[in-house]
Amino acid sequence: MRRRLITNLVLLVAVVVGGALVYFEPWAEPPKKQPRLADLEAGKVERVTITRSGESTKQTVLVRKDGAWALSEPFAMPAESRQVETLLEGLRQRVKDHFPIGDRDLGAFGLKQPSLRIDVAGTTIALGDKVPTERAMYAKVGETIYTVDTGLMRRVDQPATGYVARNLVPTDAQITRIESDSFKVARDGDPEANWRVIEKTGSVAKDAGKTLGRAWESAVASDVEGKQYTGDLQVDVRVYTASRDQPYRFARLGTEDDGNVAVTRPDLPVRYLVSEGMADRLFSLQKPQKSQDASAKADQSDRTGSSARDKS
């Protein structure tokens, strides 16, 4: 009885071990990792150049300085670091299929005269046509053609304004004073200090200074357009910061067809699009219209009540 039990246990162990060997195949070579489109370390990249071919060749040049990304062409402006990092991750993607060019016709892949080229860390990547049978597109690096995610084209094929930082005032700037022809709001050197209304024209809401200051500290555009206002420009607001002698000067241009309000800085070749509500908070210290209406109704009610009491 005992001998039979031992025999069965040995057989069971043998079956388990054998199954494990068949399943895990320890003798098999580990699968090779798919190659990257561009073998680069994103944290060490200092410059990215995107060239668009066409009637007029245009370049977008992104450079990293002191750990922050900025545009240097076609204009100089801070860049949205997250956008650049997403682009670099797309360039580092692992590719499923690749093959040598050999005697193949590059025109068949849209790579003879590619519309887009990216130069990064000594590597040139050309983007071609879509792959007919799958959601991928052709890319050329050196003498090799790769099939890559079509999302890479969406990241690359955008105007330079697509990389512009959306903050109206740089995120690392400490705002100390906000002025216009009708108001002046300031706070002490402590960034946690309360905003104070120093000068004003007309009545203002109780926390108008705080509302204005916080609005400018968190102002982010929904979009940026590459249009510079060339006419006579009336600057509406001047924003002073601790690290800059001259203020950032802003002007409210007007409402666009989509309902957003265009805001510009005369020194920049772009304009920001913000919601109408945000524009009102950024450029006005007056009481909200609802508060004014409520006050007017209260005054009217007081006058009516007083007249009734006088008559009685």
Image (cartoon, helix red, strand yellow):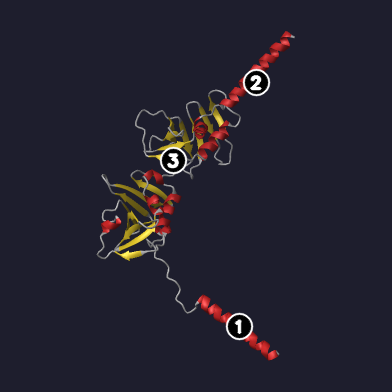
Residue 197: % across, % down:
56, 30
Residue at x 70% of width, y 15% of height: 305
Is disc 2 in contact with disc 3, using a CB cutoff of under 8 Å?
no
For label 2, the residue is 298
| Quadrant, the N terminus | bottom right
Residue at x 44% of width, y 47% of height: 80
Question: Who is closer to the viewer here, 110 or 65?
Answer: 110
Residue 233: % across, % down:
39, 29
Is disc 2 in contact with disc 1, using a CB cutoff of under 8 Å?
no
Amino acid found under the numbered disc labelled 1: Val
**Which image quarter: residue 194?**
top right
Amino acid found under the numbered disc labelled 3: Asp
Question: Who is closer to the viewer here, 39 or 188?
Answer: 39
For label 3, the residue is 223
Mark 3: secondary structure: strand
- Badge 2 or badge 3: first in the primary sequence: 3
Mark 1: secondary structure: helix
| Quadrant, the C terminus | top right
**Which image quarter: residue 94?**
bottom left
Q: Is residue 85 left or right of residue 114?
A: right
Residue 12 visible in the current orientation: yes
Amino acid found under the numbered disc labelled 2: Ala
Q: Is residue 165 left or right of residue 290?
A: left
